[in-house]
Amino acid sequence: MKKLTLSAVALLVFVVLVFQGVSFVQERSLRQRLIAEQQVIEKPVVERPASRSSSTATSAAASVSDLRRDAVNWDVPFTSQAPFGVWDELHGEACEEASVLMVMRYFAGKKIASPDDADSALQHLVAANTALGFAVDDTAAEIITLLRSEDPSLSAVLLKNPSIDDLKSVLSKGSLVIVPAAGQQLGNPYFRRPGPRYHMLVLRGYTKDGYAITNDPGTKNGEQYAYRWEVLLNAIHDWNGGEVESGEKVVIVVSR
């Protein structure tokens, strides 16, 4: 009787695992299908925010038209924060620099040519970040300082408490969005468990069907990784001295 019970439990566990695996495959397949339906746009029409002198904007979306695209997917070059798959101390903490690199290359009209190219640029940005006196984990405001230091032609402003409509508006007009997040709330199955406490990624577009399209440097599978809007917005939090889950909901809107 005991053997029969153990066998039944093992069978139940197997069925649950199979069901979870099928569900994950179906969800990933749906995300990829939705992304594939969206055109990758190579040449955006970019408008500067109304004020470039301030690093804070209560609503960066106020400077854009209410008319927005049904779907957007800007052609943003991708790199993992660990281009060679080596997750040492430097690369394990380089999501901020990887996000900055992808945004800078996009607005410069340049690709990320190779893992060597990506790693060299990441190490430069890590050194530049250190030279500015910032810690390993950067706040959104510190990322703006780094961006302006590396490319003064870029406009970067904070958007507080963004809504889905706000983010669609700025993306529709050609901006990109750098998102600081409580990484474990993203639930990305490709993250090393339990996922990063603090994370940063690039929002590059959105689908017609409720997904935000990102370049997520926290995984080699992060190019055009789609999150449900609700998941992404829930996870948005600034560094907040390490108390990330109670950090302010703020993103960085970048344009040229």
Image: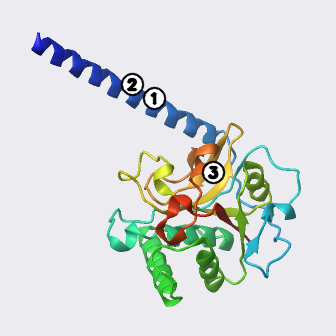
Quarter of the image that includes the C terminus: bottom right
Asked if disc 2 and disc 1 are in contact, CB closer than 8 Å, the reply is yes
Is 195 placed left or right of 132 in the picture?
left
Label located before the other in sequence (2 or 3): 2
For disc 1, the marked residue is 23
Badge 2: how crowded within 10 Å, few (<14), some, or many (20+)?
A: few
> x, y percentage for residue 116?
41, 72
> The residue tagged with tag 3: helix, strand or loop?
helix
> x, y percentage for residue 16?
34, 24
> x, y percentage for residue 110?
61, 71
**Disc number at residue 62?**
none
CA distance for labels 2 and 3: 28 Å
Residue situated in front as seen by the camera: 53 or 111: 53
> x, y percentage for residue 52?
79, 78
The residue depicted at 40 percent of the width and 54 percent of the height is 195
CA distance for labels 1 and 3: 23 Å
Is 256 placed left or right of 232 in the picture?
right
- Amino acid, disc 1: Ser
CA distance for labels 2 and 1: 6 Å
Q: Is residue 40 above or below residue 64?
A: above
Q: Is residue 102 above or below residue 69?
A: below
Asked if disc 1 and disc 3 are in contact, CB closer than 8 Å, the reply is no
* Closer to viewer: mark 1 or mark 3: 3
Quarter of the image that includes the N terminus: top left
For disc 2, the marked residue is 19
* Closer to viewer: mark 2 or mark 3: 3
> The residue tagged with tag 2: helix, strand or loop?
helix
Q: Is residue 222 above or below residue 95?
A: above
**Disc number at residue 233?**
3
The residue depicted at 78 percent of the width and 66 percent of the height is 58
Badge 1: how crowded within 10 Å, few (<14), some, or many (20+)?
A: few
Q: Is residue 67 at all visible to an observer of this figure?
A: yes
